[in-house]
Image (spheres, coloured by chain):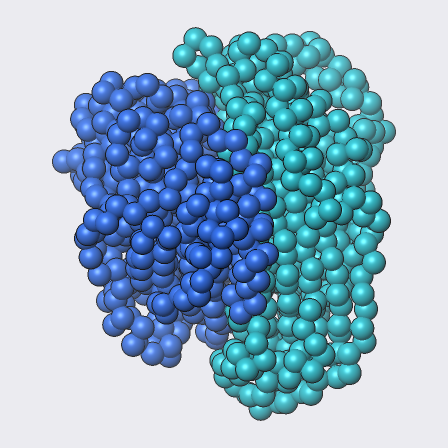
Chain colours: A cyan, B blue
Amino acid sequence: MLNQNLIRGTLDAALSNGADFSEIFVEKRSNQTIGLVGGLVENTVSGQDYGVGIRIIRGTESVYAYTNDTSAEHLKIVAEKASLALAGKSKERVLDFRIRIGTPLMEILKYLGDIGKKEKVHLLKEAHESASGFSDEITQVRINYLDVVQKVLIANSEGLWVEDERVRTRTSIQSVAEAGGEMQTGHFAPGASMGFEFYDTINLEKFARSASEMAVTMLHADFAPSGKMPVVIENGFGGVIFHEACGHGLEATSVAKGTSVFSGKKGEKIASDVLTAIDDGSIPGQWGSAAFDDEGMETRKNILIENGILKGYMVDRLNGKKMGMASTGSGRRQSYKYSPTSRMTNTYIAPGSSSFEDLISNTEKGLYAKKMGGGSVDPATGEFNFAVMEGYLIEKGKIGKPVRGATLIGNGLSILKKIDMVADNLSFGQGMCGSVSGSIPVNVGQPALRVESITVGGRKER
Amino acid sequence: MKKFKTQGLFELAQKQGIDEIEIYIGESKSFNVKVYGGKVEHFGIEENRGLSARGTCKESMGYIYTENLNGIDREKLILGLKENADIMEASEKEEIHFDNEKCNSMELKNTAIEEISEEDKIAFALEMEKKAFSIDKRIESVNYCLFGESSGGRRIMNSKGLDLCEEKNIAFAFISVVAKEDGKIKTGSSYTVSNEFKDFNAESLAEEASRKAIDQLQAKTMASGPQKTLFSNEVSADLLQAFSSVFSGENVQRNLSMLKGRVGETIGAKNLTIIDDPLMSNKAGSRNFDDEGTCTFKKNVVENGMLKTFLHNKKTGKKEGVPSTGNAFKGSYKSPVSIAPTNFFISPGPLSLSEAMANMGEGVYITDVQGLHAGLNAVSGDFSLSASGFAVRGGKKAEAVHQITVAGNYFDMLMDIEDICSDLKFIMPGSGHVGSPSILIGKLDISGE
């Protein structure tokens, strides 16, 4: 994307006023979005993001500068200006580059740019038909398609040179059902780090029908119950509970400053015996995967919790330095506009030995959370929340009447000890995770599990 | 902002079968500094520039954008635009306009703040951190402490003759502290958004963040059940921002708003007035013209409980048979023209916070909610949110409460507003800059124990 001399010159200029380390992140990214409303293409945008981020580190201080003007003269000016912010004495020199070109974790069979826009629209129209034809009560369907080809070049003063390409596509389907002056929605949004062949591996029409089914079910559902109760959380996107309750707290971003509730707890028992949790950015084709992280480190499988014992954190370069730990390939950023930091990739709870039926039949009275929305957490306190979009009452060990959405809240440290049953049906769900280094694609995942007691923010007394 | 030379781009577009074309350029320069442990921890130096084009081809609007302004391939740009136009099927046609009206020319940029040295701004952030530690021994750490500023502009030019340009700047400070006592941990934060340096007060920001954290240290949960609920100004503004899309003409016409068909009807309590005012001084949502070049103006969206208008751009206004309300909005140069409020707020009422508490007698005063992006559905109006605040007993603020949820339906809630306070506050700008005073709601569902 940019030649070696230019990169070397920029990294050198970045060190010119004294620093330990300089890094350049060059990004060229093609985006295509297509939006259907009521089955018609209402908007479509394509374009190219193009920019360069320069990071300089001295000790634990850092500077991050970015620009869209990638001419040699301008990059030198930006790098020198950035280096002035950290002016010091030590002066490192840029080592020879060891060039590595990332091979995709999974071969791309149908390159997104090679697929005609009309073919993409055709796929979405079929999904629309399935969603809108599900019921007379479906009054609107919105479908948003996106594909991204992100080319990055990451080089640093230690001689690292990594080129990588990330290909991703995702389609979100939102159905609206309306009756008796009320509206309810249903939503699915499958995605992967794959080319257009992704849509050969899934049945998008089935997702579309499921979105409508959810909207219609919720239209006729009662309010969720209110207060503390046992909750069985569905597999797949249910993994949002671990993402919020614990995942963010295990990112070095907050651990390094000692402001995470999980700081200094490595080797301690923090969860029940049935819980093993993993973050793995190297799973081929998954939404949160890439061959390299955004600091040029190879992604890998990191065991976070094993049988309830905290085994490790997710660590990036700068926070690793503060913590005296090596990078775990977890440095990520939304784009060249963000300085990287430790983030999740594909985070999941490992399968247990119970069956889904065991979870339900062992629950006398509670809530079955079938479809989850997003959530958030304050890593300093561990207080988290996530939304249930579609729920069902559990009565006498059986799944009963559907109930509308409610937020579930708790505290990460205490909830991990309350996960008392884990099923054997691991699957993944896709999401966008927002934090200090921007909004990035992540998978959450889990088998169905049971929390023995958690606060359900419903609207009906039990 | 520099003049952009279209250099025959319009002519080339027309030669390639594009009837009308519009160029939109956005640019910004930012600086920010984060401090930690009495030292600068991180500097950010940002330059951003991008260009998008929209153009009509066989009556369909196509969009394309690029950030590579040094290497624009004009042929490729126009081809991409045409390909995108080719698949468009919108029921209502989007058009390019030139009204040739003279808009207000309110100054949105205060260059004085840019003349204050970076050293002074760093000193401000360091002072904020230092003050936080000096306020109370229970302040264990300051996990975020930053000052930043950004200046930028947008330029819109089209083949019908429109050429408008506007520059603005804004600065912000944010602090978040962690308080600890008896093994209990709480965080609190505060912020200021302004383009006048004198508005930034290190002591009061540190004090506010610390007080929020310390006040919650001894918080307990509470029993589940319906309660009279007083939302703080920040929380009410958070909710209004999350539900602001229900006032968008686009969402109404797409059958995604429960307010469709209700202009002229009562949708809120008698004391509720919601204003969209793009011409307020030193406010992040201010603008003299919108992203289609339409002049902006102040209007009441809800007046004494009655829905007066939706927010429109040219396309949705035309469909409704009304003029644009000057609310055409592009999230950035990358985005298509949509709709957003400008400075959008609930008009303040006569009461002080303590008078509102005296009126409510018993209930809960919510000062913080979390998970707004998840626990809230702008189509149905339903919300269920993690919350914290204080119990109110005997008309006075009592003990702190946390680990509760507050749930209800926003449309029902607007009808059930009992009191509106005088303490109007604007929150951090998002798509639009939203504000509210504290508001008292008849009843909402609380979950705790």
Q: In which quadrant of the rendered view does residue A97 lie?
A: bottom right
Above or below B196: residue A462? above
Above or below A359: residue A407? below
Residue at 37% in and 53% down: B158
Relative horizontal placement of residue A253, taking residue B406 as reference (left or right): right
Above or below B421: residue B103? below
Q: In which quadrant of the rendered view does residue B11 lie?
A: bottom left
Say how many tags the image has.
0
Q: In which quadrant of the rendered view does residue A263 lie?
A: bottom right
Residue at 22% in and 61% down: B107
Q: x, y (%) of residue B176?
A: 44, 56
Q: Residue furthest front?
A: B15
Above or below B1: residue A440? above
**Could you say which is closer to the camera, residue B407 or residue B222?**
B407
Q: x, y (%) of residue A175?
A: 56, 23
Q: x, y (%) of residue A397?
A: 72, 12
Residue at 27% in and 64% down: B109
Q: Is residue A183 visible?
A: yes
**Quarter placement of the N terminus of chain B:** bottom left
Q: Is residue B231 visible?
A: no
Residue at 51% in and 33% down: A42
Q: x, y (%) of residue A374?
A: 57, 36
**Could you say which is closer to the camera, residue A186 or residue A357?**
A186
